[in-house]
Structure formats: C-alpha cells, structure tokens
Amino acid sequence: MQEGLIIRGLSAGIENKRIIDALDLEVPDGEVHALMGPNGHGKSTLANILMGHPSYVVEDGKILFDGENLLNLKVWERARKGLFLAFQYPAEIPGVTVSKFLKRIADLRRNPPRNTSVFLNELKENLRMLDIEPAFVNRYLNDGFSGGEKKRMEILQLLTIQPRFAIFDETDSGLDIDALKVVAKGINHMRGHGFSALVITHYRRLLDLVKPDKVHILEKGHIVASGGFELVELLEREGYDGIRRIVANPANPEIREAVYEH
Amino acid sequence: MNTESAALQPDASIRTIGEGYAERFGFSMPNRSIVKTSQGLTEETVRAISKTKDEPEWMLRFRLRALHLFQTLPMPTWGANLSQLEFGSMTYYSKPTESAQNSWDALPLDIKSTYERLGVPEAERKFLAGVGAQYDSEMVYHNIREDLKKKGILFSDVETAVREHPDLVKRFFGTVVPPDDNKFAALNSAVWSGGSFVYVPPGVHVDIPLQAYFRVNSQAFGQFERTLIIADEGSFVHYIEGCTAPVFSKDSLHSAVVEIIALPNSRIRYSTVQNWSSNMYNLVTKRAFAYDNAIMEWVDGNIGSKVTMKYPAIFLMGPGARGEVLSIAFAGNGQEQDTGAKIFHFASNTSSVITSKSISKDGGTASYRGLVKVEAGLTNIKSKVECDALILDPHSRSNTYPTMDIRSEQATMEHEAKVSKISEEQLFYLMSRGLSEEEAAIMIVNGFIDPLVKELPMEYAVELNRLIELEMEGSVG
C-alpha cells in the first residue's frame, strides 16, 4: 500500500456537465503540492469531490487514500480517516461556539479523545502560534467573521484536527500579508511524515512561504503540467498562455527541466 | 484564556441519545386517586372540587360565576385547531394524596419514583431554592429552603394561600387574568386546583430559582393549576416550571392561568420548559402586571404537546417598566405550536423586547402570534420584535402573525422576521470535520436556539438541547 493520495482517471462533474476529465494526480505522504490553474477549470471542484460534496457526480476513476478508495466513503467518514478541506468560503454556523466545536472535532478525529485540560493547553498553544485573541474561541463559528478571521479559523481547525491530508482551497485569497504568514505557518507546522497537502492557489506569495514539493497546473479538468517550484516562476513570467505553448512544444530545451507533460 | 472547561462540557448537547419520550417521560403509574370527579363538567363538579378543598364561600362563588362564563363564552375563532377537543369526556379533578408533603420520602412510592425518574429531587438538591410538585390535580410536594422562609418568602400551593393569606389572595387573585378574559381562563377559574403561590417581601432577592413541576398521570384528564406570583417592591425572584405527561391515546387538557404582579422596582423572571406528551392540549393564559421601573421576563420553551396556544403577556403599568419575552417553539409530527407574546404599553418611558424562535419539522406547524399595543398620549416608548423560524423539511410550516397597534407618536418600534432552512453548505462544512449528517443538523438547530437557551438555567439548557436531539433523531440522513 502506498501512503498518501492517488487519483486515477477521475472524471466527474455536476448535472451532466463534466468538469474533471480523466485526471491523474499523486501526492505522496510527507509532501505538499500546489495546484494552480485558471478560474473555472475545476480546482475547487476537485477539492469538493475529494471531500465528498453531494452535489458532484463521479463518472469514472478512483481516489485512493492510504490505499483505500475514498469514493465509497461518506463525507464524515473521509474526515475521520484524516482528510481535511480548508474552505474558500467557510459556512457560518450561528449559535455554535468555536471552543465547543473545536473540542468536538478534535474528539471525532483523535482516538482516544483528549481530556479537557490537555485540549485546552493545545488550544492555547495553537492560538498563540496563529496570533489569535483568546476571546475568539467564545464567538460563534464563522458568524460575522471577516474574511481573514474565517481563514485563520480554518487553520486553527487544521491544527486542532491534525489531519493526514489537507486541501487548501484558495486559503490565501483576499488575505493581507500578516494573515498570509499565519496560514503559511500553520501549513508548515503540520508538514512532515504522516501529513500531505494540496494547496490550491492563484498566487506565488503563499507558495514562497510554503515552498511546495511539486506544482501542478489544472486546465479543462486535466493536469496539463507538473514540475518543481520553477513552474511557479515560469507561470508568473509567461502566464497560462505561455504554459500552453511550452506544453505544446516540450522539445524546447530551456524549459524541459521545469515542465513535462503529464 | 477566558475559556472555562465547563463551557466545553455540554457536549451532551451534541451527543446522540438513544431513548425517546416514551421511556424518559411518557411512562405512567397506576391510578391512585383518592377523590375523583366523574367525567364531564357540571355545577356538581365545581361544587365537589370546592368542597374537597374546604374553601371559603367567596371562592365557591368565584368558581360558579366562572363556570357560567365558560359555558357562555365562545371558542376562539383564531389560532390552532381545537375542533377535536372534547370537554365532555374529560375528568376535571383527581386528588392523588391526602395532603402536600415537604419530604420526598413521605410520598407514596409510585409518586416519589415518578419524580425521581424525572430528576426533580436531584435538581432540588443541586440548584433550586424551593420546589413544588403537582401530580394530576394537587401539589403533592412543596418545600422551600429554611433561610428563605425566614426572610418571609411565601411559597406554597394556592389552596394553602387561600387559607393562610386570604388578604393577599383576595387582593390579587383573578385581577390580572379575570375569568371573563377568554373561555379557557373561565374554565380554569371554575375548576382550578393546585399551582404555586409565591410572595417575595420588599427588597428580598431570591438568588437561585424556585421551581414547580407539573405532572399529569391520568388519562383523558384536565389539569388546571393556577399560579399567583407577587414580587413586592425592589425584590427579585426567578420561577421555573416544567411539565410532562404519559403518552396515552386519548387527549388530555392542560389549561393553566398564571398571574404575576411585579410591584415597583421588582424583577421577575418566569421560565417554562413545556414538554407535554403528544396527546396534550396546552391552552394557557399567562399575564404579568409590571409597575414603575419593574422588569418582567418570560422565557417560554414549548417542545411538547399536541396543540399549544400560549401568548405570555406583559402589561407595562408604570413609567420605567420593562418587559421581555423570549420564546422557543419546536413543532414536530402532528404538533401545532401557536405561541407568541402580548405587550401593552400603558405608561411612558416603557420598553419591551420580544424574541421568538421556532423550528418546524415532519409536518409540524409553528406560528408566532404577537401583539404590541401602545396607548395614546405616551412618550418615549421602545419596542423590538424579532422572529426567526427554521423549517427543516418541505412538509412543515411556519407562520408569523405580528400585530402592532401604536396610538402614540413618540414610539420607536422595530420588527424583524426571518425564515430559514438548514443549508447544504452548512451541513457539508460540518460533515467535512467529521460530524455525521444527523449530528451536523442537530448542531445547527441547537445553534439556532442557543441565544435563547443560554437564558435558561444550565440544567434546563442541557435538557432542552437533549429534547431537541430526541426530536431530531432520524430526521435526516
């Protein structure tokens, strides 16, 4: 059994519209990969499908996580196996306090559950690391939070749950530099054996702080290019058009090292 | 860090509980009544009740006049459906024991074990200043802490008050809710039995709550308790009532009258967690007079019953008085919760807030029905009404009937009403953290009512959350 995430020949969509098309992707355990690509080409759809959003229909393919096919599992079963999605637009849950919620999700994921004082110590530690005011945990979950607060909340949940695989769906969008650093800190803190991640983003600035092991470009529901950090630089210089040209002509020696057709 | 570990504990609120109403509350004991009137309601019934209680003549006359009113007043033509309510097939009085005791051990075993199963003695030990327990028609238990008794607080059944404090009773009884107020107030006035009498002397603060627990054990039975609470000047009291009944196939009726007098500068909070069984008609008239600078608060939780019609009212009688009604209703399969509030501003510089939250599911109907009235010529009046409804499935209904009758120009009125559903995005978000669909839905519903549940004492808050869970079980997924 190979640890980590393996996607093979995944085709999926919504209401008879195929969005993900024969997609292959591997994120081995211990690695952090970036997923980039133009808007509307399936990045968020892929994130939602990995987590099991009921609105999407999977037509074909497999998603293996630590050797098990996730497609047979319900959303919460995937979560309890260690999958985590940091949402682009986290839902607001009025009336549910952050502290109570964090305790509950920590208990669900970890076996045996932490006792309250251990949990509180960890929570204090995490709040300090993410530069979050303690009073924050008495608020209702995401209710009336600013964009930046919602993203910090996602990272706080990441550290609380300690998942085995996390997807960050444009967690960096709309963040100021301080909040961005907090997000990067959270991801880097998790990094290591037993954790892998897919960071969906449009921008280099988060990747400068997180330094992905690999970068993938998704277009029309398909991975069109994969490479190292050079791919991010190339993308910044050439844009998606440039990537398309290069992919169409892989013989170009200047870029052969940076890009290969998937 | 200001998070206390205690705040994390009511995880009971999001735990799935396996037992249902029938096991926890819906059990019954053998009928043990020592005095019982025959089925139906006649003058004989009323005379028999009065005679058993060995009442003074004035009270018998009060009852007979009320009976006449009951027979002549029309059924309400609005509100919930009462067409199946059969007055003729009910028993109006059943006395389970000779007299009220102030020790649980002195009660007959079946009655004692009933309250133990309901957790009443335990609650008394833990967090109550005094407890009254009514079983069918009579208070079988009544006790108040010695130190409070010494401060002059009176807490008894109303019959005892009629005997021992006739001046207080005569002065206030039937003045807040007169028998001719409505058909069910007339009915209660004719056959009332049991209920609490509370008097708090000037300046005395009762820091922990008094509680009355109303239990119906008989079948096709009417419970008609009558409660009278008087907070003298500058005093404070919090009174809680809980109610449950066995599940029977025949309908029962609970028709209480609650009269509250908040004298100048006093504050009264009255909290109800009503969890009657699904064969209960719950038709209750609750009203408070709040005098100068007094504060009256109704916290009204309606979970159970077949039909409830209840609109706790506050008459703001003196300048500076303030009234607040918080109401939570849960309407499940076959249930109709027609609840709300009535506020009358009779004096200047008065304010009121009504906050209502309802949840309907499995074909249940929850209606908010409210009235805010401001008399002419008053100044500096403020009122705010907020109604939120959560509808859990397409078979269920929520209605809002707000009425504002404002005859004064210097009044600031606010009204907000909102109807919502549990969104798929909320469910997906919570499930992505490992909560099952059912637990996610329960968490959202508990969150919806949390701002009101917080106003209840902790033990009741947990209980209410547990009840919501029971009601929600199997409703999704």
Image: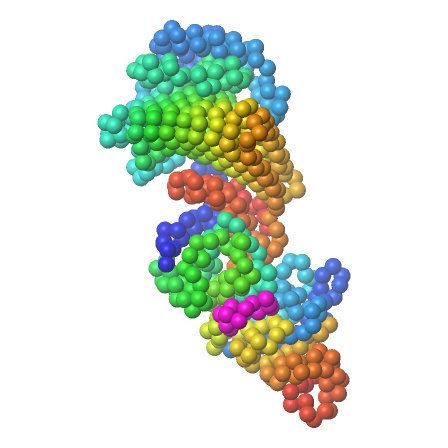
Q: Is residue A70 left or right of residue B272?
A: right
Q: Is residue B341 left or right of residue B57?
A: right
- Check the image and report above or below for B463 versus B182: below
- Check the image and report above or below for A204 versus B244: below
Way the structure is coloured: rainbow
Residue A58 occupies quadrant: bottom right
Which residue: 38% across, 25% down? B263
Quarter of the image with the N terminus of chain A is: bottom right
Residue closest to the eye, A65 or A155: A155
Instruction: Examine the structure image and report whether residue A180 is included in the region drawn in magenta.
Output: yes
x and y percentages locating residue B26 in the rendered image = 46, 33
Asked if one can make out residue B368 in the rendered structure from this viewpoint, the answer is yes
Instruction: Examine the structure image and report whether residue A183 is included in the region drawn in magenta.
Output: yes
Count the labels in the image: 0
Quarter of the image with the C terminus of chain A is: bottom right
Residue closest to the eye, B73 or B122: B73
Asked if one can make out residue A67 in the rendered structure from this viewpoint, the answer is no
Among all residues in the image, which is located at the extreme bottom?
A: A253
Q: Is residue B115 left or right of residue B311?
A: left
Q: Which residues are magenta?
A: A164-184
Q: Is residue B163 left or right of residue B448?
A: left
Which residue: 53% across, 74% down? A196
Which residue: 32% across, 17% down? B160
x and y percentages locating residue B458 in the rendered image = 39, 42
- Check the image and report above or below for B158 versus A121: above
Residue B243 occupies quadrant: top left
Residue A77 occupies quadrant: bottom right
x and y percentages locating residue B295 in the rendered image = 41, 31
x and y percentages locating residue B358 in the rendered image = 56, 38
